[in-house]
Image: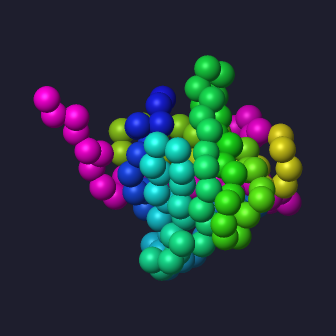
Amino acid sequence: MSDNELTGTWQVVSAELGGQPMPADAAAKVELEFTATHYTVNFGGEATDHGTFELKTNSELNEIAMTGITGVNEGRTIPGILQLHGNRLRICFALEGSAIPREFRAPAGTLRYLATYRRKDTPKSHAP
């Protein structure tokens, strides 16, 4: 997986935090945008979190670390794992510390955030 594969806008299909599902009306308002080096989380069209990200794809699981520059996660680095299949992206973040999740689960009693996204836009082609 490369940064280029993530580039674009992703719409939340479903999400849960600590075993509690995100209401569908709230999920419909959440978008995650990736550029080559930065991410932005938008809720209802307003940026609520913006920062940089780093991928580590030479491991058993594709790992991501998102570091907030502005917004709700300013100054925090949040570790996670991700899986990309076509136009579907699944990410599991550990909001409670620095340990990288080892599975795509957000069980009750944890601060794990598990989300499935659908690509909202088509990646720009690199035509000759």
Q: What stretch is highlighted in magenta?
A: 100-128
Please state if 64 lies on the left or on the right of 25 as rendered.
right
Residue sitting at 69 percent across and 51 percent down? 67
Q: Nearer the viewer, residue 96 or 22?
A: 96
In the displayed structure, would residue 91 be above or below residue 73?
Answer: above
Residue sitting at 73 percent across and 44 percent down? 79
> Which quadrant of the figure has residue 21?
bottom right
Q: Say whether residue 4 is visible.
A: yes
Residue sitting at 66 percent across and 66 percent down? 70
> Which quadrant of the figure has residue 113?
bottom right
Please state if 46 lies on the left or on the right of 9 as rendered.
right
Please state if 124 lies on the left or on the right of 22 as rendered.
left
Check if residue 121 falls in the magenta segment. Answer: yes
Please state if 116 lies on the left or on the right of 101 as rendered.
left
Check if residue 40 falls in the magenta segment. Answer: no
Across and down, in percent, residue 78 comes to 74, 50
> Which quadrant of the figure has residue 128?
top left
Q: Which of 68 and 26 is in front in this view?
A: 68
